[in-house]
């Protein structure tokens, strides 16, 4: 029996996709009331307090986008912001990978501890606090290939309007990523960004590798190619070419019955 293998370049692309999904999970639901202080710890204290208030009484919620659906279920005993998560890509019959626990409370603590207030900057007409993290792996181990990360948090609304990450690209096939967040909406008290745009920065050599990978996929047996397309959804072309990946939320549901098999 022939065993299918995955090339190093294909593995690089999959790691890159994993990083995108890790950032999506980390960003989902990051919103709060305006911050009043001008240091990282005080800003994150305000965010954390408002976030705890926002999710008080929320047992579960579902975020459905044009690319994936993520289910959130409160983790008993995990604190006020601990939710078990499960993500299902469009075209898949069941959630991908294993379940994880997302604890925003701990992430806020890490940002307060490891972040540095770097002044303000105007992003798309919005004045934002800038918080810089010199070692992103201290925020999330999935970001270990990144050397620096910046959060741009609105002075008046305290939403994240942009994130910038820079790295050497050795592990993820890219040298950096910029995430734009916008179209914030509130559903049953829960405020989320309804549009996220991911822009990756690649060297010319990395871009050529991705193009070669694209050609290799075109030459794959039909069943194998369809399986890869099912795993990565309709945004595969943008992911492989380095073009911006736009995720648009289609619906948010709070405290509804979770579908069977979500967890």
Image: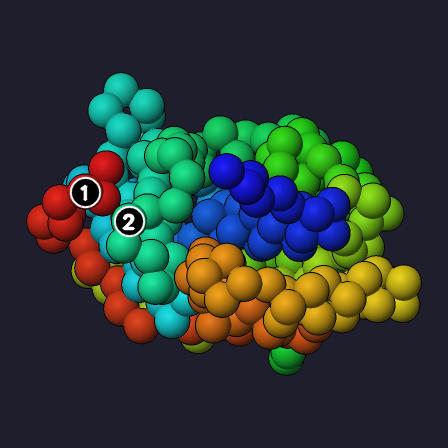
Q: Secondary structure at mark 1?
A: loop
Pinpoint residue 34: horizontal percent, then vertical percent.
48, 57
Depth check, front residue: 124 or 163? 163
- Disc 2 and disc 1 in contact, CB within 8 angstroms: yes
Depth check, front residue: 60 or 97? 97
Residue at image point 54% right, 30% down: 109
Q: What is the total number of numbered labels drawn onto the structure image?
A: 2
Residue at image point 64% right, 68% down: 219
Q: Earlier in the sequence, mark 2 or mark 1?
A: 2
Q: What is the quadrant of residue 174 in the picture? A: bottom right
The residue most toward the left is 257
Residue at image point 50% right, 58% down: 224
Depth check, front residue: 182 or 179? 179
Q: Secondary structure at mark 2?
A: loop
Which mark, by number, is residue 142?
none
Pinpoint residue 198: horizontal percent, then vertical percent.
61, 66
Residue at image point 33% right, 25% down: 79
| Residue carrying label 2 | 94
Q: Quarter of the image for the C terminus: give it.
A: top left
Q: Residues within 10 Å of mark 2 (few under 14, many from 20)?
A: some
Which mark, by number, is residue 261?
1
Separation of marks 2 and 1 at Cα, in angstroms: 7 Å
The residue most toward the front is 1
Depth check, front residue: 157 or 141? 141
Pinpoint residue 165: horizontal percent, then vertical percent.
73, 53
The reply to whether residue 262 is in sight is yes
Q: How is the image coloured?
A: rainbow
């Amino acid at each position: 029996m022939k065993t299918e293998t995955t090339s190093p370049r294909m593995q690089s692309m999959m790691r890159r996709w994993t990083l995108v999904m890790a950032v999506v999970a980390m960003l989902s639901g990051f919103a709060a009331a305006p911050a009043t202080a001008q240091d990282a710890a005080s800003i994150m204290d305000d965010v954390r307090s408002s976030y705890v208030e926002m999710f008080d009484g929320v047992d579960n919620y579902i975020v459905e986008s044009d690319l994936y659906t993520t289910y959130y279920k409160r983790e008993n005993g995990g604190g006020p912001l601990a939710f078990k998560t499960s993500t299902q890509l469009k075209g898949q019959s069941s959630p991908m990978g294993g379940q994880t626990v997302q604890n925003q409370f701990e992430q806020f603590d890490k940002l307060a501890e490891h972040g540095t207030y770097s002044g303000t900057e105007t992003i798309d007409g919005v004045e934002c606090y800038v918080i810089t993290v010199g070692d992103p792996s201290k925020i999330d181990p999935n970001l270990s290939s990144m050397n620096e990360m910046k959060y741009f948090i609105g002075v008046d609304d305290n939403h994240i309007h942009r994130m910038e990450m820079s790295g050497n690209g050795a592990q993820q096939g890219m040298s950096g990523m910029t995430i734009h967040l916008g179209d914030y909406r509130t559903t049953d008290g829960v405020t989320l960004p309804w549009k996220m745009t991911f822009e990756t920065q690649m060297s010319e050599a990395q871009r050529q590798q991705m193009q070669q990978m694209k050609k290799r996929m075109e030459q794959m047996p039909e069943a194998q190619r369809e399986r890869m397309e099912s795993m990565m959804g309709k945004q595969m072309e943008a992911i492989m070419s380095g073009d911006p990946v736009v995720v648009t939320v289609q619906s948010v549901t709070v405290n509804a019955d979770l579908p069977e098999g979500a967890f």
